[in-house]
Image: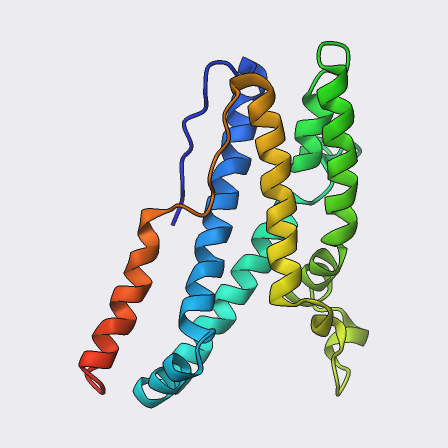
Amino acid sequence: MAYRVKTSRLIPRELRRLYGYLSGALFETHDSLHTLEELYGDSSVVDLLNTTAPAFFAHVKEILVRDIILSISRVTDKPGNPRSKPPQENLTLSRLVLELSPQKHPKLHARLEKKWKRIEKLSAPIRTYRHKVIGHADKVVCLKPTRKLGKKISISLIRRTLEKIEDFLNTFDYAFTKGETGYHSIGHYGNVGDFVAYLKKNPGDC
């Protein structure tokens, strides 16, 4: 599901669309994570899914995990590649730091740059997995009988990374609007619970 965030006019015009994209991307990632936890975080629900359509729901889980990894990797990538033709500019947290004027907003720029460096380090295993397994097929990694690369990525790491990204974006937002966004308060979450409730009442119907 794509979230379009309407940004405040108090945010500098040249940064509104970039901030709006990053904010929407975080909503989408939280949505995918919540769906993953609702469907696969409870053993009784997993048993129900396995009874209903095991192969299908195993595929759904794989899709959700890949979506979360790709989403986090996209927003934590480098700001772009100026040497490519035409120059590639990525919609990332680092680009928001790059395009925020350090002359006009020196304190905010310094705070965001510090927060970004922490996020970059924390999310490194996620981007590495995206690069070597999902985005590309690294020969050495993918042909290993026992692949250990993905073991570095846990739900805990994903949660901590999303919390840091949320803090980064709210720091930016608050500096101009004196307001913050609650990225966990999305009404669409009820759909997953409704689906599970339906399966419990109607086992074997799917």
In terms of image quadrants, where is residue 88? Answer: top right
Residue at 50%, 52% (x, y): give it: 29
Residue at 70%, 68% (x, y): give it: 137
Q: Nearer the viewer, residue 64 or 83?
A: 64
Image quadrant in which the C terminus is located: bottom left
Determine if residue 86 is in view. no
Q: Residue furthest top?
A: 104
User: Residue 148, relative to residue 128: is it above or below?
Assistant: below
Q: Nearer the viewer, residue 11 or 42?
A: 42
Task: Check the image and tell me how it is coloured.
Answer: rainbow
In terms of image quadrants, where is residue 129? Answer: bottom right
Residue at 74%, 40% (x, y): give it: 78
User: Residue 123, relative to residue 92: is it above or below?
Assistant: below
Residue at 46%, 48% (x, y): give it: 28
State the image coordinates of residue 191 (x, y, percent, origin top left).
28, 59
Q: Nearer the viewer, residue 58 or 178?
A: 178
Judge left or right: residue 63 versus residue 200.
Answer: right
Judge left or right: residue 135 versus residue 115.
Answer: left
Judge left or right: residue 162 versus residue 58.
Answer: right
State the image coordinates of residue 33 (x, y, percent, origin top left).
49, 60
* Number of callouts: 0
Determine if residue 196 is in view. yes
Q: Nearer the viewer, residue 14 or 165?
A: 165
